[in-house]
Amino acid sequence: MSTTAQGLPKITGPGLKKEGVVILQAFFIAFFTAIELLFRSGPGIITGVIICLVLFGGIRFGRKGTTYVAVVTPPLAFAATILLYLLLTEGLKPSRLGLDFIASLAAIAPYLLASALYGWFIYFNEKAKARKPKPRI
């Protein structure tokens, strides 16, 4: 009996499409944020590190042209997760909901800023490299 992996399908294609990047980033952010919210009752370092990791993963494993989606998705997925959690736990109390939402965003702000700066640098760097140079007169 041979030990080769003949039955396993090989990964084809250059990487994840835009939809795949969004789904994976949103899933990992929602999963780890929910775990941290249940155990610590607030987002913290685990959620921040996961946000940075999914940004790097989206840039690394996405196809060409998915960098914009990989940069934009993590803050939106985190905000949607926090808003859904607060709506389920606090209810529709606007002052309480707004205060808790802003506090949750502030707790993760350094990680969001660092990952956004890195992501936008990569995006604009790729865009600049793809542009043709202007002819000199």
Image: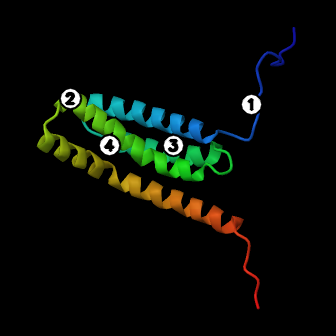
- Mark seen at residue 123: none
Q: Residues within 10 Å of mark 1 (few under 14, many from 20)?
A: few
Q: In the image, what residue occupies the spot 53% across and 35% down?
A: 24
Mark 3 and mark 1 lie on one chain; the one further toward the N terminus is 1
Q: Which residue is mark 1?
A: 11
Number of numbered discs present?
4
> Which residue is found at the position 40% from the left and 45% from the top?
76
In the picture provided, is 12 more to the left or to the right than 82? Answer: right
> Disc 1 or 2, which lies upstream in sequence?
1
Label 4 to label 2: alpha-carbon separation: 18 Å
Is there CB contact under 8 Å for labels 3 and 1? Answer: no
Looking at the image, do the residues carrying marks 1 and 2 touch, with CB atoms under 8 Å apart? no
Q: Relative to residue 16, is residue 40 drawn left or right?
A: left
Q: Quickly name the residue at label 3.
A: 54
What number is the disc on residue 44?
Answer: 4
Q: Confirm or deny contact between disc 4 and disc 1 (CB under 8 A).
A: no
Where in the figure is residue 109, as x and y percent of width and height?
A: 33, 54
Residue behind mark 2: 89
**SS at mark 4?**
loop
Which residue is at 35% across, 29% downward?
35
Could you tell me the amino acid type at mark 1? Ile
Screen quadrant of the C terminus: bottom right
Q: Are marks 4 and 3 in contact (CB under 8 Å)?
A: no
| Image side of residue 27 versus residue 127, left or right | left
Image position of 108 (left or right of 26): left
Mark 4 residue type? Gly
Residue 75 x/y as whole percent: 41, 48
Question: How much space separates mark 4 and mark 3, taking CA atoms?
Answer: 16 Å
Tag 2: Cα neighbours inside 10 Å, few (<14), some, or many (≥20)? few
Give the mark, 4 or 1, whose residue is nearer the N terminus.
1
Q: Compare marks 4 and 2 and give the one earlier in the sequence.
A: 4
